[in-house]
Each structure stands twice: as structure tokens, then as C-alpha cells.
Image (cartoon, helix red, strand yellow):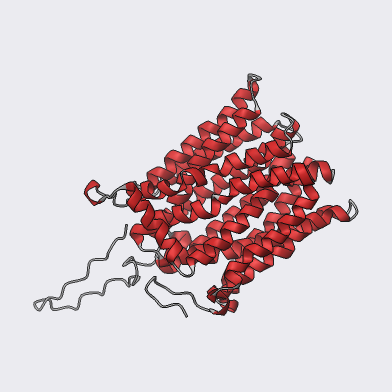
Amino acid sequence: MLSKNRPVPDSANQPKAQPLPPPTDSATGKTPSPRLWRHHDFRALWVGDTISQVGTQLSVFVLPVLAIQTLGAQEAQLGMLTACETAAFLLVGLPAGAWVDRWRKRRVLIVNDLLRAVLFASVPVAWWFDVLSLAQLFVVAALVGVCTVFFEVAYQSYLPHLLDSDQLVPGNARLQASQSVAQAAGPAVAGGLLRYASAPLIIFLNALSFLGSAVFLARIRSCEERQTRSGRRRLRTEVAEGLRFVLTHPLLRRITACTSLNNFFASASSALFALYLLRDLDLSTSTLGLVYSASAVGGIAGAALSGRVTRLLGEGRAIPVAALLSVPGSALTPLAAHVTATWRPLLLIAGGFLSFAAVIIYNITQVSYRQRVTPPDLLGRMNASVRFLVWGTQPLGALAGGALGATLGILPTMWLITAGGFVAALPVVLSPLSRMRDLPRTDSEPIH
């Protein structure tokens, strides 16, 4: 996966001094690029992902609205829809990492973009012929989830192949910023479009976005080595190796525990959020889109401030601080039900802004650390193991949120989710990370 610069040989018969080779990164041997915006392959990855993220946010907003307003979905059915979207990380997340390590990751990214385009396009086609059902939405969500598993694992494992180790933090920051911009723009655009266009048409636009993403990913020039069959071992052995690396690493296992618990409670909230705003708080779909978008601006702020925060607090301490900062933000969601209608959108926006900012700072820091500390041949399996552990809790959280919402009511469930967010932060707050300014640069570096 790594390319080396060839040193200039010494020659006694050479009258002139030979120019020195360009400096290389000590960890990767690659020549560092001075600016990421001039890096052709990263730019193609960045643009393609940005297009895909905007389309994804359209569907994240429109799918539950379509299920609620067109197909009459209730709490338990919305929980099932959210669970279907993430069930693949629980079911195929672990072997996906071993497979991705064996394949060319650029091809994995392109193929799964094309498959998601076809799956999303099936929704407006079914609606056009008046055969759309909740069952089809469940199937589409589940299959898109499988594609997303392979895309996400390949995506995070591919970035260290394109960039030097000291470029991973700014590279991840730019990608997280694009995701945050998409989260800010997507729901607002979707909320506005719903006034003039149907939800299935907006989902068709999402399908086109995945085609656009595939076009830009195809422009990446860098070609990685494919693992030879002679170097392969049994799939079970390779999967276990990646899982063992994550679970035995003293810092990664704490970060993984925190993220896993947080995703469980966040998914429970996500399953009920649209119904909570549209039915219980009596907000319009355009206001719902505004709340989603304005909240996501916090993610943009988090991506922009992540470098300053890590320099101020240190990489280690930034992780538990960011995990704790998301808790008061999430508390404003149920608190909105106890204020007048005028203040409800403002509280929801403020809470979302703080939560998004904290989560993005947390993600940029811990993902960059994971990529840096993992041996190159383990990247796919490490990412798949982490995804299995942290995203595998999402379908369980969505089902729990739907069941609790139907039994206790949405508002009490939202307060329980807020308390769960505090519990989720404890694995990193009560860990060496709270005392560390700098994180180890390699897996062999001792942890103090």
C-alpha cells in the first residue's frame, strides 16, 4: 500500500553533487504533499464523498418522512426502519474487514456507490407504479446498509494509502467538514423541496448523487497492491486478528466502548426524532429540516475547531472532553417539550449544534489516532472490527428506542437517552486519556 522514493546512489566518478531526494515521511516513506487541495487523489476522494454525503442526508431526512406521511409508520416501525439501515454492521461487519484487506479498496468504493444508486432508484420506481410499501423500505434500507459497511471500511482503510501519516488529521478534518456541510445543507434542501416535490423524487436525486460520487472516485490514479492468494489465511483467523488488536489495545478498547454506547443511545434517539418533532412538538417538515441543518452547522464548527482544540487540550484529553460536551446538548432535545412553541426550535438547534460539534471533534481525533497506530496490513480488519463493535449497537438501539417510545412515550424515552449519553462517556473519562496530552505515534510506543 505504500510507495518508496528511490535514493540517489553515490558515484565516485560523478563530478557534480547529486540532488538530495525529497524528504519522506518516516512512517510511510511517501513524499509529503505541501497542501491537500493540490493532492489529486485526495481531491477526487473528497469531492466524490461530498456529493455522496449530500445525497445521503437527503435520504436520511426524507425516508422517515416518507414512512410517516405516505405509509403511516408509527414508533415501532420507525425503529425497525432505522435498525435495518445499520443491521449490516452487526451481521457482516467483521468479515467485511478481512475481505476489504484482500481487495483493491478503490474498486470496493466505486462498486458500492453504484449499488446504492440502483437500490435508492427502486423507491421512486415502486412509488410511480403505486406498489411502494414499508416492506420495500425495510429491504432497501438493509441492502444499502450492507453496501455502506463495505464502503465505510474501505474508505477509512484507503485514506492512509493516499496520505502521509502527518496528513491524516487535516485530511479527516476536511472529510468530516464535508460531512457536516452535507448534514447542514441536505435536510434544509430536503425540507424546502418537500414543498414543491414528492419524497420519492428527492430519493431519486439521492440515487444520482451516488452515481456522481462513483465518477469522481474513478478518477483516483493511485493503484494499491492486491493481497496475493498465497499470503491469505483462513477468514476466521484474519477476522480474529483484527478483533484481537482492537480489544487488547489499552486505548482503542476504551474509545470503542465509549463510541459503541453512545451510538446505541444516539440511534434510539434518531429512530424517534422525526416523529417527536412532527407529532409531539407539532413542527412542520420545513422546520424539521431547518432544525437538522442548523444543528449540523455545529459539526462544521467542530471540524474547523478540532485542530485548535487538540492543540489546546492535547489529543488525549480532547477525546473525553468532547464525549462529555455532547451530553448537555442532547438534554436540550427533551427539554424542548417543556417550553413554549416559540422556543422549541431554538432549543433543538442549540442542543444539536453543541452535540454535533463535540461529536465531530471526538471523531476526528480518535479516527486519526486509530489510522496512525494500526499496522497497514491490519487497517481493514481494525476498521471493520471497530465498525462492528460501535455500529453494531445501532440497530439494537433503534429497536430499543422504538419499543420504549411505544411503551413509555417518546418524551420519557428521550430523557433516558440523555442519561445514557453520560454513561457512554465514562469509558474514556475514567481512562488514561484524561491525563494524556499526546497520544502515542505507534502501537509499540508505551502509554503513560
Residue at 20% over, 75% down: 18
Quadrant of the rendering where the N terminus is positioned: bottom left
Q: Is residue 212 visible?
A: no
- Outermost residue on the right side: it is 340
How many numbered marks have been drawn onto this rendered protein structure?
0
Q: Looking at the image, is 166 positioned above or below residue 242?
A: below
**Is residue 61 shown left or right of residue 101?**
right
Q: Looking at the image, is 437 positioned above or below residue 121?
A: below
Residue 166 image offset from top left, x and y in percent: 43, 69
Q: Is residue 199 visible?
A: yes
- Outermost residue on the top side: it is 129
Residue 76 image offset from top left, x and y in percent: 70, 38
Residue 149 image offset from top left, x and y in percent: 48, 45
Q: Looking at the image, is 284 positioned above or below residue 124?
A: below
Using the image as rendered, state which of residue 338 and residue 315 is in the foreground: 338
Residue at 56% over, 80% down: 435
- Outermost residue on the front side: it is 407
Residue 116 image offset from top left, x and y in percent: 51, 37
Using the image as rendered, state which of residue 278 and residue 195 is in the foreground: 278
**Residue 332 lies in quadrant:** bottom right
Residue at 64% over, 49% down: 267
